[in-house]
Image (tube, rainbow, N blue to C red):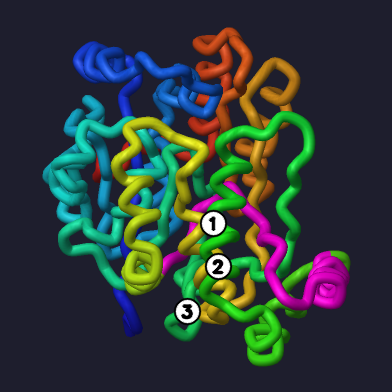
């Protein structure tokens, strides 16, 4: 018997859409770093496999909220009963549109009409490779996540991602007293679900920095959330989240979805879980390994990042297509 409804939310953009590109160009007079580069909006044409994986590996999902600025991929069956095509205009404040910032969109996804209290957030580069039971995402009504402490690494060139992590952590430490949270939820921060090395690192962080959290691991993987967590963070930091929402491109002043993930961890409102996930850029050096992992279904999930350098995109995309075809060759109901 179904205990709870669980939805999926996935963001997608067609970086080749001429209307979208023209509108983006109107607002792109500012200097942008690599987090706003063209590569970040490039479409590998792999979304059919994302939907095939949903249908094959997570048939229990109640609804898939497919979030775009308005465009729809040609393959998509918009009449599928589990599909909810969500436009930015359906849930974003009018003054924030158009937006080209995933941070702004992420911080408002709890406003999607009809979204379940329990949902899993995906980027369009995250793919499931094996059957995933509901318990991989929620247990006893709580979102499954890795909750061990993992200090933020600020080495080398500091980009928007690191700035967002620092901003996220600032929110958490403003609203949670680490000593009291560790006293109450220490067994979740140091759990048998994690590797012993991770528990030692968490214990060291608790001893060396007892008064404030130093960071948490950012697994670039699907994240389980409670809609009420987003509401709590908005109630706690309305001005900061409003500023993030109004930035049309990613900015160093932003917070991102990690602030809600870390809020769940700091509050102890999570179930300890160690995700079997692999993250890799798709480039000349990694493409063979990526395709082998996909074909062998060696992990539950895989995230295929765009490289920051120029690559032979079409050739690499074709390699990835062939790999996914070995695992998910059959069209699904989400396809025309």
The residue that disc 3 covers is 142
Marks 1 and 3: in contact by CB < 8 Å?
no
Q: Residue at x 31, y 51 (%)?
A: 242
Q: Position of residue 123 (x, y in %)?
A: 44, 43
Measuring 35% from the left and 17% from the top, which residue is drawn there? Answer: 28
Residue 233 in which image quadrant: bottom left
The span shown in magenta is 198-225
Judge left or right: residue 155 versus residue 4: right
Does any portion of residue 169 appear in the rendered image? Answer: yes
Q: Are marks 1 and 2 in contact (CB under 8 Å)?
A: yes
Mark 1 highlights which residue?
A: 168
Q: Quadrant of residue 148?
A: bottom right
Relative vertical location of residue 326 with respect to residue 66 in this rendering, above or below: above
Q: In the displayed structure, does residue 184 sit left or right of residue 326?
A: right
Q: CA distance from mark 2 to mark 3?
A: 19 Å
Which residue is denoted by mark 2 in the rendering? 172
The answer to which of 190 and 327 lies nearer the viewer is 190
């Amino acid at each position: 018997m179904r205990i709870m409804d669980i939805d999926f939310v996935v963001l997608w953009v067609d970086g080749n859409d001429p209307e979208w590109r023209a509108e983006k160009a109107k607002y792109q007079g500012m200097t942008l770093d690599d987090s706003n580069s063209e590569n970040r909006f490039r479409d590998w044409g792999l979304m059919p496999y994302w939907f095939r994986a949903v249908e094959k590996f997570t048939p229990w999902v109640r609804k898939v909220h497919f979030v775009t600025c308005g465009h729809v991929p040609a393959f998509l069956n918009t009449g599928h009963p589990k599909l909810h095509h969500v436009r930015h205009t359906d849930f974003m404040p009018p003054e924030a549109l158009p937006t080209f910032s995933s941070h702004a969109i992420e911080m408002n996804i709890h406003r999607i009409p009809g979204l379940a209290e329990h949902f899993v957030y995906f980027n369009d580069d995250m793919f499931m490779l094996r059957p995933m039971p509901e318990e991989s995402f929620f247990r006893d009504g709580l979102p499954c996540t890795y909750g061990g402490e993992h200090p933020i690494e600020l080495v080398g060139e500091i980009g928007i991602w690191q700035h967002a992590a620092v901003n996220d952590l600032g929110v958490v430490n403003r609203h949670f007293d680490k000593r009291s949270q560790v006293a109450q939820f220490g067994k979740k921060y140091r759990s048998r679900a994690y590797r012993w090395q991770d528990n030692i690192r968490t214990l060291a962080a608790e001893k060396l920095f007892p008064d404030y959290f130093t960071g948490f691991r950012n697994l670039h993987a699907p994240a389980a959330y409670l809609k009420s967590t987003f509401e709590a963070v908005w109630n706690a930091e309305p001005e900061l989240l409003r500023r993030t929402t109004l930035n049309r491109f990613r900015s160093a002043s932003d917070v991102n979805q990690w602030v809600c993930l870390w809020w769940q961890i700091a509050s102890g409102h999570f179930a300890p879980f160690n995700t079997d996930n692999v993250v890799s850029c798709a480039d000349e050096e990694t493409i063979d390994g990526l395709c082998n992992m996909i074909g062998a279904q060696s992990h539950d999930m895989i995230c295929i990042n765009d490289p920051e350098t120029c690559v032979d995109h079409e050739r690499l995309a074709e390699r990835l297509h062939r790999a996914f075809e070995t695992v998910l060759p059959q069209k699904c109901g989400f396809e025309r």
